[in-house]
Amino acid sequence: MTGSILFEAIVFLLGAIICVSIAKRLGLSSVLGYLLAGVLIGPYVFGFIGNEGEDILHFAEFGVVMMLFLIGLEIEPKNFWKMRKTIVGMGGVQVAGTMLLSYFLFMLFGFDWKVALTFSMAVALSSTAIALQTIKEKGLLNTTFGASSFSILLFQDIIVIVMLGALPLLANTDKPTVDNHNGQINLLQNLPLGLQTLAILVSVVLIIVAGRYLIVPMLRKVAKTGVRELLIAAALLIVFGISFLMELVGLSPALGAFLGGVVLSNSEFKHELESTLEPFKNLLLGLFFMAVGASINFIVIAKSPLTVVGILLAVIALKAMVLFITASFFKLKLNQKMLLTFSLAQVGEFAFVLLSFAFSLNILEQDQLDIMLVVTALTMTLTPIIGIVNERVILPRLGTKESIKRPMDHIAKSQKIILVGFGHFGSTIGRFLRTHGVEATILDHDSNRVDFLRKMGFDVYYGDATRTDLLESAGIAEANILICAMDNPDVIKKLVKTVKSNYPQVKLMVRAKSRYEAYEFLNMEIDHIYRESLETSLKLASEVLSQMGFRKYTLQRQIQNFIKYDEDSLKRLAKEKKIGDDNYIFKARKELEQQEKLLEQDFKRGIVEFDRHWDGEQIRAALEENTEK
């Protein structure tokens, strides 16, 4: 230890680079690499980081805040409202069930009822940071499992407010207590409950109103300056400002950030905010995981090994049981149940806040606090390992089977087209192919969707298409075309690399959700890229022009010209090294000017030529008018 912040930064960065690189090389989660790095550099192994690890942990919790803000950006308000039953239903059942069973568990361990109740509150909370980061890494956020996990975690973020409000009722009044926890300021703590509730509602309304009438206009002003770093500062100001407001009224900063993201999800700055904050989120989350690893107190483990191990195993088993029952009650398929069970079976980061607050209220003794903090950190550390065991050992034996009525090899030989991903985009492709007598081998990684589509008459197979053995079973060696219709670009890239290296004869047709994804796929030498909103946008625009009196055939021809010119431009701009810099913007503007000029020339030629196609009524009327003359 040198006490130098530069030395500590070097230690953290070097530990992350080495351990995460090793973890990814072994096919493990990056979260596990960060946790391992934290353990190694912490005070109980190499000792590079000492008591300041707790301060780093609180700072790094901003990574969780940013993650929830970015997730909120991806969820439109109407979709969030549709999730309310799942959030309250699954989240409520999980929290209530876990608290009830864990309360009796801790009573059996010999703890006082107040301590047992406090511990049960902490145990009911799972780690939003670890669970969602792992889910996003695997591209499972839009699956039934991902949506269920998110609903439970969001309910926990809400209910932790109630827990923090209830803890003072358990305080031992014969000893002096600390008014607030972790240095947080709560302006409402001395107000009557009714006024506190009103203030909280006003704060939520304030965020919604500010999002529309203050934040978006501010971002427009900042964007007009053309200074990139100002936009970054504005994005950070939004997240920190909303989080601070939530702290002032005693709410979870992460919950406030999520709400702010939902409010801004329909704004034109949605994607700009995502791309700006993503690097900060990833860096702070990595720091958070390392701080958790560094906080594992091996001295406490050495003093009470049986107690720590006993509580650790009991907590994980209890939470896993409750989660499995909850998933069964809401009719998730077996593999989705297993994923949910092992992904959320840890104690989460809000437990650190809850336990520390309880200690300040003299509910917990020092040794009780130390044991539960160690158990919390250990459950978070073990989660990625348990997830690997689940995916590689349990799911292959118990999960949804990857074949149905007839053997996969027979089906694989009969189909020359493989369609991966059967959501709203892929299902349209599959239906259109089937209406023309062309069948495809369809793969999807959401077992609930697979089960539903089988009932609809589609031969759909569950599995991870990035696995070579599954591709072999699907007949990739004899296929002509593989269609990538998933909505996760990282999964598509992995699949493309696998196919290009092992099956170069297969023609790849790839979905791109944006122009920037299309750039990446072009640079991977993929020739057939389909931007999901391009044709739809042009169709809408052509309908507008048709309503204004433009001829449909001419408009259809102009759509084809627009697509051709835009794809040519796309290939040229994809060669730019830095997308979004001044050089790219200059060239992109020139491309737009050239496209508009070419389309204008094409349109003028189309009017003069008098096409005898489509628009039969208009043509007949024109011919009759000429005949009368």
Image (spheres, rainbow, N blue to C red):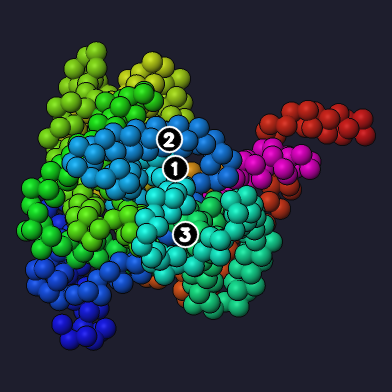
x 39%, y 64%: residue: 177
Q: Position of residue 226 (x, y in %)?
A: 57, 76
Q: Looking at this view, is 27 or 374 the one in front? A: 374
Q: Earlier in the sequence, mark 1 or mark 2?
A: 2
- Which of the image's four quarters has the N terminus? bottom left
1 and 2 marks in contact (CB < 8 Å): yes
Which disc, if any, is residue 215? none
Label ID, residue 92: 2
Q: Secondary structure at mark 2?
A: helix
**Magenta segment: does it hold 615?**
no
Q: Residue at x 21, y 23 (%)?
A: 401
Instruction: Read off the residue under disc 3.
Output: 253
Is disc 2 in contact with disc 3, using a CB cutoff of under 8 Å?
Answer: no
Residue in the foreground of this view, choosing between 552 and 79: 79
Extreme residue toward the right, this view: 629
Query: Quadrant where the C terminus lies?
Result: top right
Residue 535 seen: no
| Pointer 2 or 3: first along the chain | 2
User: Disc 1 and disc 3: Cα gap in Å?
Assistant: 14 Å
Q: In the image, what residue occupies the spot 25% across and 75% down?
A: 52
Question: Between marks 1 and 2, how big is the CA–CA gap?
Answer: 7 Å
SS at circle 1: helix
Residue type (three-letter) at the residue carrying disc 1 = Phe
Residues in magenta, as a range? 537-563
Q: Helix, strand, or loop for circle 3?
A: helix
Q: Which class describes the residues within 10 Å of circle 3: few (<14), some (14-19), or many (20+)?
A: many
Residue 155: mark: 1
437 relative position to 359: left or right = right
> Which quadrant holds residue 17?
bottom left
